[in-house]
Amino acid sequence: MNQPLLRVVVDTPLRRSFDYLPAAEGALPAPGCRVRVPFGNRALIGVIISIESQSDVPASKLKRIHEVIDDAPIFDEPLLALLRWASDYYHHPLGEVVATALPKLAREGARLGARVECFGLTTSGREALAAGEPRRAAKQRRVLEWLRDHDDGAGVPATALAELTGWREAARALQAKDWIHVGERAVPSAAQLAGGEPAAVQPPALSAEQAAAVEAVGLRDPNAFHAWLLHGITGSGKTEVYLRLAAAALARGRRVLVLVPEIGLTPQLVGRFAHRFPDVPYTVMHSGLTDTLRLSAWRATSDGSARLVLGTRSAVFAPVPDLGLMIVDEEHDASFKQQEGGFRYSARDLAVVRAQALGIPIILGSATPGLESLHNVASGRYTRLHLPRRAANAQPPMLRLVDLRAERVHAGLSTTAVTTMQQHLADGGQVLVYINRRGYAPTLACTACGWVAPCQACDARLTVYRNAGRLRCHHCGADRELPRQCPQCGYAVKTVGQGTERVEETLAETFPGVAIARLDRDVVRRSDELAAVMTRVASGEARILVGTQMVAKGHDFPAVTLVVVLNADQGLFNTDFRAAERLAQTIVQVAGRAGRGERAGLVLIQTEYPEHPLLAGLLEGGYDAFATAALEERRAAGWPPFSRLAALRASATQAPQAIAFLEAARALAPEILRRHAAPLKLLGPAPAAMAKRAGRHHAQLLIESAERGALHRFLDHWLPAVEALPEARRVRFALDVDPLELF
């Protein structure tokens, strides 16, 4: 076949591409362009991944595409290569990977370039005008003259013709005579431009460690890949290092992509960058935007009008042209890993892969780096830049354990915590109270028969929301009325435990007249609501802030002098091998909110296990000592980063179906292992820690290997066989490569 073929992927779970003939007319579209294609009895939006000369499909069965949507590729070759790599590494269909990289409206076929209707003279129209036509239609003649005088070769936009009274009717008559033609022209998108006076922006003086970090990156070839781990304690000025390095990249004419783990951090970091670079157009990409705004942000990124792009996880796929620097803030955060749904990827890891492919530097910043990143430093793959001191000579907070076994406790607050809060409030300080539980209480129980309020769809208890008078499940969203008595025996019910709502109530009773703010996902659902809480705290209006993990992530509260951690024991005895790492990171991050201003900070950690090695180690040696010990434990146990994991997860309406599927999948392994001699082992199958969620029963099978290559070679041969199993039709299943949580 001499005619070129278009190899296209579409948003389906099929692990293959599809060949199509080009349209009968028009230029051949390039790889990276979207096309509308016939697919069965439907028309789907696909993306061309290559141009081929041969196909396995007989020529008589090849269909033509319906439409070319893009004039130019929306994915350049490096970005297409990243998507292919991600598809291979995470063993996920390329069509769904590509769809993940696109905003929703783009997946539905919306044009990425904004377009307007435009008009121009035809050859016959020019000849008619030169001959003095039209002689008896003044409005038509005026339109022809306007087009002759204002057409720059791309046509005159309809908005420009609007100055002429009655132009639309005249244009229709001229088009019928073939004296004008009608088309479209692209309109460049406009990125946001920060306000403010550049001269008023005076960067603060760098500390010796900050200056050394900026200099180390600057001395490297800016057009060569290098991964830097910026390990700075909380308050050490990591953001200022980001700003200096971004300034250097922008000065070279390059663009900068900054990733943050959650929407909550985006406004704060955007504000810092916008203030520092008031003349640099920027755009923001995160899931909190409307579909229209997300498409607009993609447009501004794709056409290059945005020189600075800030976003959450999916922004790792942003089509930034001439990218010169990537920054991943809070690189340890689990939010960078997509853990639900179809395509389960790590934005942090893909950012490193993208930077390496482009030959540009990448900065991974954190006060509590992930153990994988620290292992990469030890093995020479990353270079660590250390900021061990706080900016402006602020002192690190002092940590102190509060033994709850020896304390009187009321609604989760120990006597020591209450008296210490009184002292700090009296001295003009602010207080942050951390508890990683939303709602009023985690359990509602009967005082007589022992009944607890269960979720009918999950192996979980319903959370009490007393102010709303509701019981809610944090796993499936179930919602029902809060009962006044036990539905089982009729006796009185009581709340057990504390959540942010109850702690807020207790603090209001304990400190009357003191303004309290709460920060959790029940009171903050949008960025403007978050900004309102942040303003109350920053202005000093709110003296006490109560919150969940949202308060631990990157926020700067200079007046906070005391942090109280209420439930430090929650992660001490978790069966997940990463639980200790997550707990240590949370404690250090929350503690880092104290004493960031001129006054010293204090952190009280309430625990019933003050002798626990993790807590004792954090107090004595800080996060570095914990990480060193934790890495040695991982090495001895053969857990990541000293091995590689993949998890095959399955769910079904009946528990035996999920287990049967995973057992059948495991039974396929010995033959594949025999043929390919892959050094790996399979663990399970076993029910998930919470076996029933949202009415479905969940189980998993772990695949572990000391060699990354061996794991992926096995998965390449095993997955097609797993998908062909008869049992696969009775379950939902997904593969999670490098899982962060063992459910």
Image (cartoon, grey):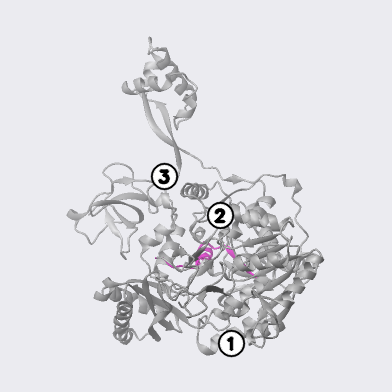
358 within the magenta span: yes
Quadrant for the N terminus in the image: bottom left
The residue furthest bottom is: 636
Please tell me whether mark 2 sits on a helix, a strand or a loop: loop
C-alpha span from label 1 to label 3: 52 Å
The residue tagged 1 is 632
What residue is shown at x 69% (from left), y 61% (from top)? Answer: 516
Q: Give amino acid for label 1.
A: Glu
| Residue 491 seen by the camera | yes
- Mark sitting earlier along the chain (3/2): 3
The residue tagged 3 is 111
| Residue 198 in the image, given as x and y percentages of width and height | 72, 46
What residue is shown at x 35% (from left), y 86% (from top)? Answer: 677
| Residue 115 in the image, given as x and y percentages of width and height | 44, 38
The residue mark sitting in front, 3 or 2, is 2
- Mark sitting earlier along the chain (1/2): 2
Residue 267 relative to residue 96: left or right = right
Please tell me whether mark 1 sits on a helix, a strand or a loop: helix
Which corner quadrant of the image does residue 522 belong to? bottom right
Q: Is residue 292 above or below residue 711?
A: above
Residues 221 and 550: in front is: 550
- Mark 1 residue crowding within 10 angstroms, few (<14) / some (14–19) / many (20+): few
528 within the magenta span: no
What residue is shown at x 36% (from left), y 21% (from top)? Answer: 174
The residue furthest front is: 490
Q: Which residues are magenta?
A: 342-366
Q: Give amino acid for label 2.
A: Arg
Q: Are marks 3 and 2 in contact (CB under 8 Å)?
A: no
What residue is shown at x 51% (from left), y 89% (from top)? Answer: 637
